[in-house]
Amino acid sequence: MADESTVGGFDDDGGQAVVARRVEVGLVWRTSALAQALFICAAVALAAAMLPGRWQLVAFAAPILGVLSALGWQRLPSKMEVVARPAESRCFEGEPVRVVVELGADPGAAAVDLTLTALTGTQIEVSRDGPPIRSTAVVSAPRWGRYPLQAHLAVVAPGGLLTADAAAEVADVFVFPIAPAPSTAIPRAEVPDRLGTHLTRHTGPGVEYADIRAYIPGDQLRTVNWPVSARRGRLHVTERLTDRSVDVVVLVDLGAQPPGPATTATQRAVEGAVQVVQSALRGGDRAGLVTLGGGRPLWLGPDIGQRQFYRVCGAVLGMAGRPVGATLAPRAAVPPGAVVVAFSTLLNTPFALALIELSRRRHSVVVVDVLEGYPLEGETDPLLPKIWSLERSTMYRDMRVMGVEVVSWPAEVPLEHAMRLLPDPRRRRR
């Protein structure tokens, strides 16, 4: 069993502060192969001394028994402390990160061998740039996710008669998905009165020409169109179209899926969510995230900036965000007038009900269907995929009637191309 704690520190270059994780690993001591061999030799010698005329073999077994009797006199530690810097590393797919793992205290006369391992599919290179109790691991992964780094201790007591093995997770490497560079189109909706980059038909501060009207007391003098005013003999001002921003909230369905194509499609759902968030933040909009289903549903309120992008990536991996206490998206997570873009296989009924509830709250809701084809793998009746396709089309129509637009996203088509086929949403007043 391991006890964890985190402390602050600095990296090896004395620069940016890092957080170290201290893990106390419990040791269970057992006799080593050397002690077992000595015990067998002593037992054979004593058994042979029982034969007539072989009593001299007792002198051979006596020193061995004396050595074995010293096992109970040794004072051995019950636990050892392992320190990892940094405790959590964040990178994108394919990027290497460096983690230093060492013992927290001098083991004394005991011999300690420290090795580092990671999950299957992780590329790890371990080097020892110092004593055997210090190792440096360079870790990279081709796929996003959480990759724990395990430390294995092989301890040999003084004299080599007792050994102990222990293992514990000492660090976490969080690999973020890479979002494609092209921007994804955001569904059109009525935007709030907030300065942004989306050109609207509303007049106000901006650069695009809208109209010319007569001067009204209170208009700013810089809006006066002097050439037109000179020709007409009275003051006229130029009206311009204003730019506004929109709130974009991305919903991701992380519920349990049947094995096969549906499970594979969940990965594309996360990648699509990150791409939409990146496009919204590049356009100056606020972006948030809500994950429903799974073991720990979370939500992250809309915000702007590059830091929000990393928060969203962390929330996808369960590193940040507030817990969701129900199967519906919290009202605080979806501000009034926000555009909702959901990614789902549309196999979970609670997730579909959550989308319909958001449509009833007067939100513009678009769901991207990441499931392609029949969801079950293996040999089936050729008629079943056709029936499945018909039922899928009927579900699309019913969801559009409820105010939820559905966009199919085939695997071979980029998301930005699939989103361009989205029609302009119409407000359905009921």
Image: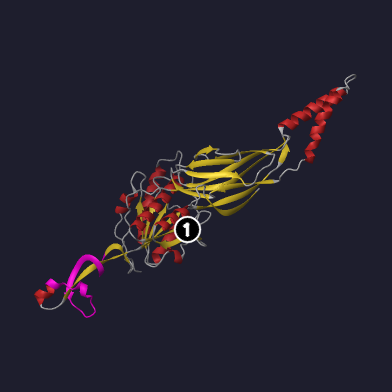
Which secondary structure, mark 1?
A: helix
Q: Find disc 1 in the rendering and name its residue.
A: 350
Residue 50 position, x and y percent, is 88, 23
Q: Quadrant of residue 283?
A: bottom left
Q: Quadrant of residue 62?
A: top right
Residue that sits furthest to the left in the current view = 231
Q: Please state which of residues 78 and 185 is positioned toward the viewer in this rendering.
A: 78
Q: In this view, does 241 lie to the left or right of 354?
A: left
Tell me if I can see residue 118 in this picture. Answer: no
Q: Is residue 158 magenta?
A: no
Judge the density around disc 1: few (<14), some (14-19), many (≥20) Cα neighbours within 10 Å.
Answer: some
Q: In which quarter of the image is the C terminus?
A: bottom left
Residue 184 position, x and y percent, is 33, 53
Tally the numbered discs: 1
Tell me if I can see residue 35 in this picture. Answer: yes
Amino acid type at circle 1 is Pro
Magenta span of residues:
200-227
Q: Is residue 210 magenta?
A: yes
Q: In this view, does 291 lie to the left or right of 207?
A: right
Q: Is residue 54 above or below residue 89?
A: above
Query: Residue at the location (33% across, 47% down)?
Result: 414
Residue 180 position, x and y percent, is 36, 48
Q: Please state which of residues 37 and 295 is positioned toward the viewer in this rendering.
A: 37
Query: Residue at the location (34% across, 63% down)?
Result: 246
